[in-house]
Image (cartoon, rainbow, N blue to C red):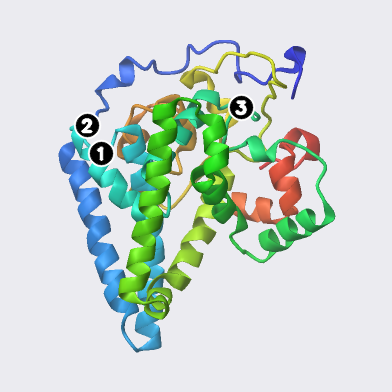
Amino acid sequence: MTHEAELVTLHSNDTDALPSSAVMSHLRSSNWAGSVLLTSALLLTAIGIALSLKSNVFVWLLGQVLLALTMVQWFALLHECGHGTLFRSKSLHAPAGRVAAFFSLIPYHCWKRVHGLHHKWTGWQDLDPTTAALVPRPLGRAERILMNVCWKYWIPLFATVYRINNYWHLPRLRSLFLKREDRRHIAISIIWYFLVYVTVTIIVGPMTLLRVIGLATVLAFVVEDLIILSQHTHIPTNLSLGEKVPPFPALEQEVFTRSLVMPSWLSKMLLHIDAHELHHMYPFVPGYRLRDIPYETRNEIDWRAWVKGARAVPGETLMFHNRIETGVDI
């Protein structure tokens, strides 16, 4: 959607039905809740690693599944720390966020800066750095085949490319952030995490490391593929086409995102990362309190229905088109 007359905007012409940010300001973070979530992730990670070191194949497989689930939880914790909403005490977010970033395979400072731009420019596909790569364009044959095959056979291409392109691609990050201080912190973050991963690989040994995290990482990326792609793909949005445009206020971003309905236990474990519309509308509310917001969002869908519908179309269709163009209402 590119022209002003076709601008994708609010579902309705006013926001009277929405609780205001001021009304929701009582939904604040808690050091206790944040500590419980962080401690549980550390404990489950330790158990998952211990089980994955066992020789019994069934115990090892149980450890991999548990570790995969915990890696997704770390991703949710990273998201929360980046927003500064996991704890009441702001000073706790940087150390916790760096640990979560380690297990998420994403440099912490890069996450904070890029995710901040994502929230600022949600609704403008070519300005949001996490969706700019999906702006409609002619696709090469090899690109189409790779995308469609990976999507059809549950190969987590997107979660991998998402990380590399948005958080490890230093030349691209330098083009997004022009201030010297930003560039310095981004470079330090990438180099530091790279060296940490190399050090861990040397100390543990490549084969042992592969045994402990190999399958778990693939499984975690498969789940994250579904979570990340469910949030903004195949939804009508706008293109700035190089024009100077204003960001959409948070309360107006509901129309540009989608929420999944997961089992309650999983949603709680992942800090309600499935309630993505509410998160965009009230980004200051901690994830574990999003479901306390008295508002029923418009683009919420059961996770099984979304997976079924999304898997029924080719990957290129899901990622480079929207439901108005395809008629696929997911």
Image quadrant of residue 97?
top left
Q: Secondary structure at mark 1?
A: helix
Q: Of marks 1 and 3, which one's residue comes earlier in the chain?
A: 1
The residue wearing badge 3 is 127
Using the image, tell me which numbered label, if any, was put on residue 90.
2
Left or right of 65, for residue 289: left
The residue wearing badge 1 is 93
Q: Residue 193: x percent and y percent?
A: 37, 53
Image quadrant of residue 43?
bottom left
Left or right of 278, for residue 93: left
Q: Residue 260 versus residue 184: which sits nearer the camera?
A: 184
Q: Residue 167: x percent and y percent?
A: 49, 44
Q: Residue 123: x percent and y percent?
A: 60, 25
Vertical position of residue 42 compared to residue 318: above or below: below
Left or right of 266, for residue 27: left
Answer yes or no: is residue 147 visible: yes
Q: State which quarter of the image contains the N terminus.
A: top right
Answer yes or no: is residue 272 visible: no
Image quadrant of residue 61?
bottom left
Q: Secondary structure at mark 3?
A: loop
Which amino acid type corresponds to the residue marked 2 in the rendered image?
Answer: Lys
**Residue located at (49% from left, 32% from top):** 277
How many residues crowd mark 3 within 10 Å: few (<14), some (14–19), many (20+)? Answer: many
How many residues crowd mark 2 within 10 Å: few (<14), some (14–19), many (20+)? Answer: few
Q: State which quarter of the image contains the C terminus.
A: top right
Separation of marks 1 and 3 at Cα, in angstroms: 27 Å
**Residue located at (52% from left, 43% from top):** 170
Residue contact at pointers 1 and 2, CB within 8 angstroms: yes
**Residue located at (32% from left, 50% from top):** 100
